[in-house]
Image (spheres, rainbow, N blue to C red):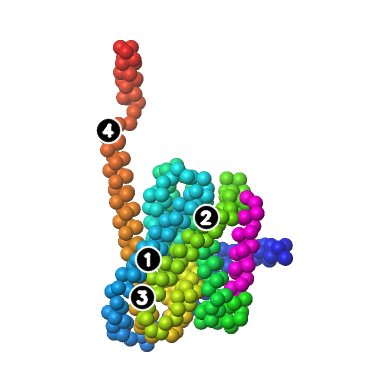
Amino acid sequence: MVEMLRAVARFFQRTIGWNRIGVMLSIAIISVAAVVLFHMLRDINVEEVIAALKATAPAHIAAAAFFVACGYFTLTFYDLFALRTIGRKEIPYRIAALTGFTSYSIGHNVGATVFTGGAVRYRIYSAYGLDAIEVAKICFVAGLTFWLGNATVLGLGVTYHPQAAGPIDQLPPWLNRTLGIVILLVLISYIAWVWSAPREIGQREWKVELPNGPSTLLQIGIGILDLGSCALAMYMLLPTHPDIGFVTMAVVFVSATLLGFASHAPGGLGVFDAAMLVALWQFDKESVLAGLLLFRLLYYLVPFALALAILGTREIWLNVNGSRRAIAEPPITSVTAPLRTEIESEKADSG
């Protein structure tokens, strides 16, 4: 079975190429989302959307903001966990928190999180002695945390409530439940695999030691807390009636998030929103759209502005501090070097 899968993978790599497949998949997802949004929003009543925004209770908005903050707080542990995994235990939590928050805030909004988030990570971590390969390893481990959390939430949610994913994937409940069980079985197999012995992937300097069994459970817990907090934020921004239940909201949110991630659109813009509108058919479109607008404000725009302000302030401070050091300690030139050597020699002789 494994050999057959490898043969299929090699066939696709030779004939098409995985990069082209990824690009075609992104274009297909964005195209479908654009068509869905056009059909769902062409008769939208803007006044009703504004009314829905005004009708959202301030307490619910405050609760959503709190859960968004909890989600970003959890994201800081993605980087801390990754740093400990690759053996860089000397990097303090405050640096991991700074890097985790800013890299994800910018990556979520700009898109292509692996590259944009990686660039922000390298800018900060390079000052603490990490090279590009180590930063790439951190991105890999952090990404693994994200996918393990998604797989756990989606597997448990779809197995428990298979109807929740039906509006998005258009599959019958029995097939969704089967897929959920398969996801959980693969997850359990992975945990057993890393628990049984130390595991590594990659070659030479790119080799990464995977977290062991207990660490993988911690990794999954971090991912669940992150996704759970974000789903709760979205849940608080929807009307109280009809009550769809938090499990349904979690399945819908994770499915929409994965579609947005696969599209590589900045913040999953359009794709995430289309999936949410389709899946939350029980609500008025205007109410869902109002909730999505508030969620984008709280989860995307506000953290993005904070991240830019933090990074901008940091860059100014580094430049000013570097300039002061340059003034205090002028560089040794070919002209001043002999004079400094002579002065130091005289000091040594007098001593």
Sequence-wise, the earlier of marks 3 and 4 is 3
Q: What residue type is labelled 1?
A: Val
- State the separation of the CA atoms marked 3 and 4: 54 Å
Task: Give the labeled residue for mark 4.
Answer: 328
The image quadrant where one finds the C terminus is top left
| Secondary structure of the residue carrying numbered label 3 | loop
- State the separation of the CA atoms marked 4 and 1: 44 Å
Q: What range of the chain is rendered magenta?
A: 179-198
Residue 56: horizontal and vertical position, in percent?
31, 78
The mark closer to the camera, 3 or 2, is: 3
Residue nearest the viewer, comparing 244 with 130: 244
| Secondary structure of the residue carrying numbered label 1 | helix
Graded by Cα atoms within 10 Å as few (under 14), some (14 to 19) or many (20 or more), the crowding at tag 4 reads few
> Which numbered disc covers residue 68?
1
- State the separation of the CA atoms marked 3 and 2: 32 Å
Q: Is residue 6 above or below residue 238?
A: above
Task: Give the labeled residue for mark 2.
Answer: 141
The image quadrant where one finds the N terminus is bottom right
Q: Is residue 23 above or below residue 351?
A: below
Residue 253 lies in magenta, yes or no? Answer: no
- State the separation of the CA atoms marked 2 and 1: 22 Å
Sequence-wise, the earlier of marks 2 and 1 is 1
Residue for point 58% across, 50% down: 209
Asked if the residue at tag 3 contacts the one at tag 1, i.e. Cβ–Cβ closer than 8 Å, the answer is: no
Sequence-wise, the earlier of marks 2 and 4 is 2
Task: Give the labeled residue for mark 3.
Answer: 237
Tell whether 345 sits left or right of 23: left
**Looking at this rendering, what residue extends furthest in the bottom direction?**
43
